Image (cartoon, rainbow, N blue to C red):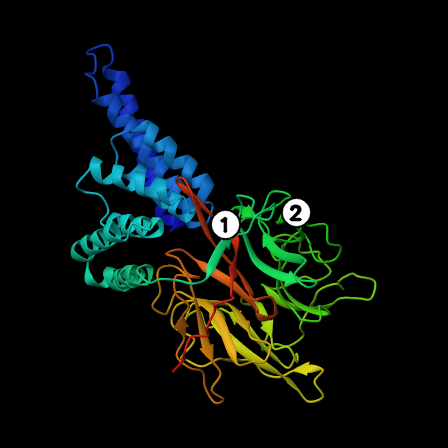
Amino acid sequence: MKKTALFIRTFLTVALLLLSIQVSAHSEMSVAPPDSTTGVIDKSASLVIIEDGKQLYSEGKVREALIKFRQAAQKDPNTWKAPYWISMCHYRLDNYGFAMQYARQAVTLSNETDRDIYELLGKSHHRLGNLDSAINYYTIASEKLPKSRVKELRIVEKIKECEFAKTELAKKITLDKKHIMGEVNSGYNDYAPILFNDGKEMYFTSRRSNTTGGKNNPDDDLYFEDIYLAEWSPETYTWDSVTNDLDRLNGTGHDALSYISQDGLTALLTLNTTEADSKSKTATRSSDICELEFSSKGKWSTPKPISNKSINTSYYDGAATMTEDGNTMYFVSDRNGDKTMTDIYVVQRAGNGKKWGVAKPVSDSINTPGRETTPYISPDGRYLFFSSDGHLGMGGYDIYVSENLGSTWSKPVNLGHAFNTVNDDTHFQYYPQWKKAVLSGFSLQGQKASMDLFDVDMTNFVMPKTN
């Protein structure tokens, strides 16, 4: 990719230089008509800038790439390539309205637009909830693209998701899902809510600008994850007093809390210091699962990665949850990424209960070739809630539940639109004692979107029947 981009840029630069010399040599003989020589120079410059932007985009530097593509559009307002790539950037940044706007512009400018643009239009409409328009563009994409590309982009599956979403949205719901009020939803990505201390406190993860160390992750150009704590205010019915000054919980890398026991004495945390601080006392090879304890002095111990090669590997391992007896843990890993995206694994205590055994993937009824993530196991170990984009859903990640049948797990059941939307819905946590659940989902604000925290009144919740 880098060699190709370098060759294209070198070729265009040389061509541009030769063209400039030719223009200079003939400048005294004739005056160039409008949109001829000058237009060609600007078009060549635009192509060079676009190649630079594509390289940045492939490296995950989407915001820097977006600046390049905007510059290219100014150089050559008539090219479809600049708005096409601007649209791609906005989609990656969850700005679905802007993604749709620039994709339309690209189609308007030329009939030679990359045919992937129709799939991009389809999924932009999909994320905005315009399901009929999404189906229309997905159908156009399936007709214009090669069959291999249609399969690669999972266009048939996306049409099924839209149809499923339309069916779900037509159903009545008896549960009340609300956007959590207060200082916890910031406009940055806020997710992974966990209730604590009789529901009076809430931990969550955020990628806001005051993250510890103030650094950006070079992989996606967002601030590193920090853990935050909020307090419930009975006077205002909101969550306030938000802070990430939590002693040992936060470092300069990724820190994300995923589980706290019901007695509030033990917890599981995902830690990644690889891109932030190689000199950290708890340096990790990738994302590792850590155990920690709450002391009698009211503080959490320093997170320590679990010393077990079947749990923490050189791949991503995280988002762990446990049964209340502390004997069975479920977590997410991408260690088999050549065959599947991310899977859920299970591991049990071994011997005297002080060490963990060998982690294995859970049943194939749960894991798919797609992505499974953010598991939550009920305290008694009977029900596993998780998010996935590999099972039929409304779009993005949906939340499912599966029942432990002993030797295997039941076929997962989609929790429906009381919990799920056409965007990502993750980090489900259920508290039957308070008749409440919390989760993460997207909030659409104008042309943009960000992950926010939600709660659901579970008073009328009935566990779905499983097969």
Q: Is 426 left, or right, of 396 in this rendering?
A: right
Q: In this rendering, is residue 436 above or below 237? A: below
Which of the 4 image quadrants contains residue 9? Answer: top left
Q: Nearer the viewer, residue 14 or 155?
A: 155
Q: Is 290 left, or right, of 466 in this rendering?
A: right
Q: In this rendering, is residue 88 above or below 373? A: above
Q: Is 326 left, or right, of 106 in this rendering?
A: right
Residue 416 visible in the displayed image: yes
Mark 2 Cα within 10 Å, few/some/many (few <14, many 20+)? some
Task: Tell me the residue at 73%/54% (across/down).
Answer: 246
Mark 1 Cα within 10 Å, few/some/many (few <14, many 20+)? some
Q: Nearer the viewer, residue 35 or 143?
A: 143
Q: In this rendering, is residue 161 above or below 207? A: below
Q: Which residue is mark 2?
A: 240
Residue type at mark 2: give it.
Asp
Residue 317 visible in the displayed image: no
Q: In this rendering, is residue 250 above or below 284? A: above
Marks 1 and 2, Cα distance to the nearest angstrom?
29 Å
Earlier along the polypeptide chain: callout 1 or callout 2? 1
Q: Which residue is mark 1?
A: 220
Q: Nearer the viewer, residue 52 or 358?
A: 358
